[in-house]
Image (cartoon, rainbow, N blue to C red):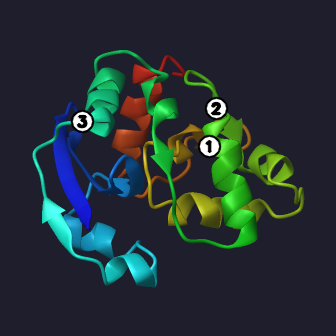
Amino acid sequence: MLSTSSIKSPIGTLVWIADNDLVLAAGFSTLAELLLKLSNEDQERVIKSCKAVGKVADLISAYFDGELDALNAIEVRQPGSHFSQAAWKAMRKIKSGKVISYADLAQRSGSPAAVRAAGTACGRNAVAPIVPCHRIVKTGGALGNYGYGVSKKEWLLKHEGAL
């Protein structure tokens, strides 16, 4: 059985779906939208709504309270191509307070020419902000897009000291 919880944050409610302490989807969206991001197998599992307690809730709260590396301790799993998996792994290695470009992300993911694919991996990230796609910006420093709105991306980057 999977569980879903949420926490109010300074930029809206963060909802997540987890298998015990393994987060399968997270975002500033509705449960229905997150369900669509799960693997086919996980979509068929029973999901129970729970109070935001436990390790994941504590780490997310700690992040919003200023412990900027707290999200690194959350384990995640999401469906995606080999390149997307490499890109998400590379995103998790970006320290809070730092940003890299989509071109840098493509390079770190093993395909320097795959800049558009790097952007697609950001867009398909089902575990934001735990997998920190908000730390990817355009070459030259412009923020670029964010699935939950550029204002949330800007807040997260300011919170982390990158802006």
Residue 87 at what x, y percent from top left?
Answer: 70, 54
| Residue for point 52% across, 32% down | 72
Residue tagged 1: 136
Q: CA distance from mark 3 to mark 1?
A: 29 Å
Is tag 2's residue or tag 1's residue first in the polypeptide sequence? 2
Callout 2: 10 Å neighbours few (<14), some, many (20+)? many
Instruction: Please indicate, yes or no, whether residue 138 appears anywhere in the rendered image.
Output: no
Say which mark, if any, is on residue 99: 2
Of circles 2 and 3, the one toward us is 3
Residue tagged 3: 54
Q: CA distance from mark 2 to mark 3?
A: 30 Å
Residue type at numbered disc 1: Ile
Q: Is residue 135 left or right of residue 3?
A: right
Q: Is residue 39 left or right of residue 62?
A: right
Residue type at numbered disc 3: Gly
| Residue for point 53% across, 42% down | 132
Q: Are marks 2 and 1 in contact (CB under 8 Å)?
A: yes
| Residue for point 42% across, 34% down | 154
